[in-house]
Image: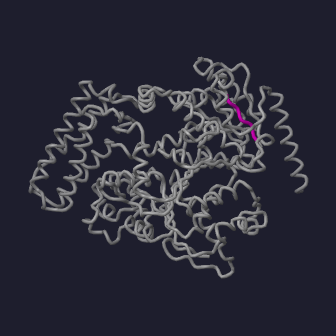
Amino acid sequence: MRQLVGQPFQRDEKAPAAPAAGGLASIFGPQGQLARHLHHFGARPQQLAMATRVADVIAAGASLICEAGTGTGKTLAYLIPALLCGRKVVISTGTRTLQDQLFHQDLPLARRLLGIPVRVALLKGRANYLCVQRLAQTGASRAMADASLRAELARVRDWAQVTRSGDVAEAGLSEHSPVWPLVTSTADNCLGQDCAHLNDCHLVAARRQAQEADLVVINHHLLCADMALRQQGVGEVLPGADCFIIDEAHQLPEVAGVFFGRSLSSYQLLDFARDLTADLAREAPGLIDLSVPLARLRPAVQALRLALGTQDRRAAWAAVGSDPPVGDARTELEQLLEQLDQGLERLAGHAKALDHDQERCRDLRERLALFAAEEASDQVRWFDAQGHGFRLHQTPLEVASSFQQHRARLPAAWVFTSATLAVGGSFAHFARQMGLEDADTASWESPFDHARQALWLMPPHMPEPADAAHDAKVADLVLELAPLTRGRMFVLFTSHRALQQVAGWVEGRLDYPLLVQGQAPRAELIRRFRDHGHAVLFGSSSFWEGVDVRGDALSCVIVDKLPFASPADPLVQARIDALREAGGQPFRDFQLPRAVIALKQGVGRLIRDTSDRGLFVLCDPRLGTRSYGATFVKSLPPMRRTESLDEVRAFFSAASCAEQTVALAAG
């Protein structure tokens, strides 16, 4: 059945008519449509209960926070009510990868089963679409010096001739390719209504389809970018809707913090200089000479980067803002931007591209001025210096009030869901973060039998995480457990330092392939892990969630420490200070809930199907020696716990016998 994005869905005459929301049992029940049409589908009461609750919330225009344990089937549990409701629905998920999976896999399945005329659209952020204007302007002076970049640009040009959507994910190039900044736009350099290629703009077409569609799939970055624009009164990027469904909602507070704040990066400054140089040469040759401030801008950006320290660093702006080298570099940047602004003022009205450049210049000046002004009590200023670049941030300490205001401007039903939202059975932490104290709550436990399928090892005699011997003990444990699990192991770390330390100790001593974060892109490492079937993968924060490895390839997850965020992080420290000043309890109200949710995500990598079996290992004795350990235990699936390696051997011996029995039966 062919499906056209943004076009009416053609009903399959053989498909059954869509049932009313009250008839969801005819879809999710043991004899329902899913059971009849999906191989290996097993009816789950939790899935039906969630779908029914979501349908009720949409009908009532209410708000719901809900947690659905791994294996519930929450995607179809909200997708099918969304398709049946007959209203405009926007669904937001955490990443572009999950967004593509939802749109290209889950949504077609649901539409095929229901066979109802629902128009759907996929909408991503601006940087995900080919910019026809910038592709036309990207010539030999910018791309031909590098052979590999020249080859990738040629591939993009060939793809540009055939693509209908302009989605860069279709082009077959790495998302990190240096060609993409040359041929995609940003909010800074987009010419908007003044663009000569406006009628061919892929972003405009995608937004038009989103306006016309009944259901739109977006991601949290786009959702929050739209909220920030509406808050500033400068426009919008999303259509209005009758219902917003936020999947992977545990990621929303951090994303919202970024978009409700302001930032300035070295890339923005250098990209502005490159575009202005090209625009002056094309639109105003010989009319004005701005070559001196333009030539000095790059060294001034580099000077500020060096003033922030030669090593990668993330810290509060207050730690460096008064340092003379930082102040001097910032002042020079201010002066250079002022000179460019004054020069462009003399060309006002000469060319639309140059008028737009002046708007960009003034916006950059405003952002830079934030880091000379006195810091606001409800904001935190900080910087992130990585490699040759930097980004300066001003981030709100809380986003609840801004999010509340946005919801008030857009009256609609709201559903917030994830496998990890509750802490000790309570949704108070998430509700407080997002200003959702008025929302209803619900939770459904995983249908997986964790007590039978999983074993939780608490290794005896583990040193405290602060002990210098802790990492060595983790390495010893990996080497001891790998033969029992036959590789098939994720080792998740709370810091890159510990990851590299332990990886160095075990390298060359394992009988299984060792895959270490940083050796290859994340997706490639996961593919290698799956394909080999007996590998050991070392990863940090990006591997704690969004990784789905079903079956025997992953049979053990080791976590080195309880994932408390470092208090040295400027955002963490600022929020701790703000809570303390307000009379709150930072550990109880902020640090502990964040750590619990992170650990739930890590544990969630282990059991992904009814046939999975696996070992969870936590190398942190604080779970049993601190009072807060009970909160972690209450929040995790009910796994059988042990301190005995003999019990681990018996667990995997039983699994091995079961595998042999299945193999003999199949033979």
Q: Residue 458, relative to residue 127: is it above or below?
A: above
- Whether residue 179 is visible here, answered yes or no, is no
Q: Answer left or right for 452 relative to 306.
A: right
Q: Quadrant of the C terminus?
A: bottom right
Q: Nearer the viewer, residue 191 or 30?
A: 30
Q: Quadrant of the N terminus?
A: bottom right
Q: Main secondary structure of the magenta part?
A: strand
x 35%, y 35%: residue: 378
x 30%, y 46%: residue: 268
Q: Residue 466, relative to residue 533: is it above or below?
A: above
Number of numbered discs visible in the structure rendering: 0
Indicate the position of residue 146 as horizontal and vertical percent values: 36, 51
Indicate the position of residue 34 as horizontal and vertical percent values: 72, 66
Q: Is residue 615 magenta?
A: yes
Instruction: Using the rendered view, name the quadrant where residue 330 is placed.
Output: top left
What colour-coding does the image apply?
one colour
Indicate the position of residue 219 as horizontal and vertical percent values: 48, 54
Q: Which residues are magenta?
A: 614-618
Instruction: Using the rendered view, name the quadrant where residue 37 is placed.
Output: bottom right
- Whether residue 339 is visible here, answered yes or no, is yes
Q: Is residue 250 magenta?
A: no
Q: Answer left or right for 367 relative to 61.
A: left
Instruction: Using the rendered view, name the quadrant where residue 319 is placed.
Output: top left
Q: Nearer the viewer, residue 126 or 75?
A: 75
